[in-house]
């Protein structure tokens, strides 16, 4: 697995990089060489924040954890990602049939298996939307009291999403193609 380590407003020392690389090698059984991990380290309010995003075969696994030390946060993040893999084992099997994930990864996910949550859509909403700017979409989202809002961007003419982040700021999701 390729690992990219980023420090936000801090220097990441070689011993920390080695620890991260060693701990993430535990996930190689799931992703092999095709996995691409980005690890971001930062300090917020006297807490160490570690975020891991792993992209493998068009599937994203993400975990963000606050802890007293980066080592604790790393251990919790890896546990979270393994839990995500176990919960979604049947979906991963489908990708296996499509040739995207190795059989060994599925077998590894079966160890310590958790019951799969059923993904049942309990409500469908339809709404009409008009083209607007991201700023207008944020205003509309706040008026509705939601944490995200889907809209058609008036400049790019693409369907986008604005969302409220944990830190109180806003994010924008735009399609690449």
Image (cartoon, grey):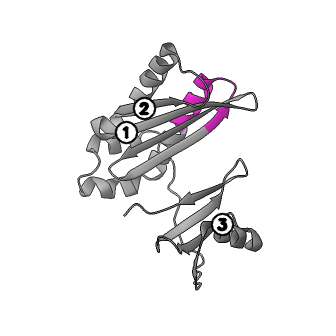
Residue 91 occupies which quadrant of the picture?
Answer: bottom left
User: Does residue 130 appear to the left or right of 27 in the view shown?
Assistant: right
Marks 2/1: CA–CA distance:
8 Å
User: Given contact means CB atoms under 8 Å apart, are the residues at marks 2 and 3 in contact?
Assistant: no
Counting from the top left corner in percent of width and height, residue 11 is at: 56, 21
Marks 1/3: CA–CA distance:
33 Å
User: Given contact means CB atoms under 8 Å apart, are the residues at marks 2 and 1 in contact?
Assistant: yes
* In this view, 58 is above or below 26: below
Q: Secondary structure at mark 1?
A: strand
User: Does residue 101 appear to the left or right of 74 in the view shown?
Assistant: left
Residue 111 occupies which quadrant of the picture?
Answer: top left
Q: Secondary structure at mark 2?
A: strand
Q: Residue at x 58, y 71 (%)?
A: 150
Q: Earlier in the sequence, mark 1 or mark 3?
A: 1
Residue with the mark numbered 3: 135
Mark nearer the viewer, 2 or 3: 3
The prevailing secondary structure element of the residues shown in magenta is helix
Q: Secondary structure at mark 3?
A: helix
Q: Is residue 18 magenta?
A: no
Q: In front here: 118 or 158?
A: 158
Marks 2/3: CA–CA distance:
32 Å
Counting from the top left corner in percent of width and height, residue 35 is at: 34, 39
* In this view, 53 is above or below 143: above
Q: In front here: 143 or 33?
A: 143
Residue with the mark numbered 1: 36
Q: Which quadrant of the figure contains the C terminus? A: bottom left
Disc ID at residue 85: none
> Where are the magenta residues, as a range?
65-79
* In this view, 86 is above or below 19: below
């Amino acid at each position: 697995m390729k690992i990219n380590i980023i420090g936000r407003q801090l220097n990441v020392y070689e011993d920390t990089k080695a620890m991260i690389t060693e701990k993430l090698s535990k996930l190689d059984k799931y992703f092999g060489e095709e996995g691409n991990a980005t690890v971001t380290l930062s300090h917020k309010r006297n807490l160490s924040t570690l975020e891991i995003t792993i992209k493998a075969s068009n599937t994203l696994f993400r975990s963000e954890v606050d802890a007293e030390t980066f080592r604790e946060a790393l251990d919790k993040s890896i546990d979270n990602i393994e839990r995500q893999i176990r919960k979604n084992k049947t979906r991963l099997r489908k990708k296996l049939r499509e040739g995207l994930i190795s059989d060994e990864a599925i077998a590894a996910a079966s160890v310590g298996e958790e019951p799969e949550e059923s993904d049942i859509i309990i409500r469908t909403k339809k709404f009409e939307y008009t083209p607007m700017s991201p700023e207008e979409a944020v205003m509309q989202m706040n008026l509705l009291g939601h944490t995200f809002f889907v809209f058609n961007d008036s400049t790019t003419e693409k369907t986008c999403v604005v969302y409220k982040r944990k830190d109180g700021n806003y994010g924008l999701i735009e399609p690449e193609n």
